[in-house]
Image: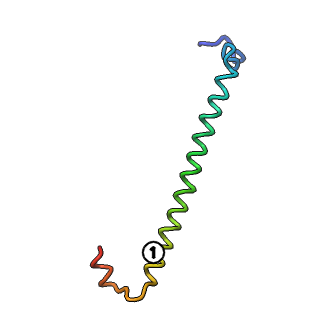
Amino acid sequence: MAFDSLADFWAMNGYAVYVWPAFAVVLGSLVAFALASVVEQRRLLRHVAALERREARRPGRTAAADEEVS
C-alpha cells in the first residue's frame, strides 16, 4: 500500500489541501453537467411536443399530407 495508514491517505503527504478540493471541483462539475443535460433534454422534449400539438391543430392538415412528408 502506498500509505502507512488511513490518516496518511487522507493527508496525502501534505498535499491534501490541493488534492481533495480538486476532486470536489471535478465531481461537482460532473454532477452539474449531468443535471444540466437532464434539464435541457426535458426542455427540448416539451418544445417538440408543443410543436407537434401546434402542427396537429393547423387547418388543412390531412392524413394524406402527413404521408407525403414521411
Percent position of residue 3, x then y:
64, 13
Q: What is the quadrant of the N terminus in the image?
A: top right
**Residue lying furthest right:** 7
Query: Is 65 placed left or right of 6 in the picture?
Result: left
Name which quarter of the figure residue 6 lies in.
top right
Q: Identify the residue at horizontal 69%, vertical 14% (top origin).
A: 14
Q: Is mark 1 on a helix, strand or loop?
A: helix
**Residue lying furthest top:** 4
Compared to residue 40, the image places residue 5 above or below, namely above
**Residue lying furthest left:** 68
Q: Residues within 10 Å of mark 1 (few under 14, many from 20)?
A: few
Percent position of residue 8, x then y:
69, 15
Query: Is 4 placed left or right of 36 in the picture?
Result: right
Q: Identify the residue at horizontal 57%, vertical 51% (top origin).
A: 36
Compared to residue 65, the image places residue 26 above or below, namely above
**Residue lying furthest front:** 59
Compared to residue 38, the image places residue 11 above or below, namely above
Q: What is the quadrant of the C terminus in the image?
A: bottom left
Query: Is 49 placed left or right of 62 in the picture?
Result: right
Percent position of residue 15, x then y:
67, 17
Compared to residue 34, the image places residue 19 above or below, namely above
Would you name the residue on which mark 1 appears? Answer: 52
- Number of labels in the image equals 1
- For the residue pair 1 and 64, the one nearer the viewer reads as 64
Percent position of residue 42, x then y:
54, 61
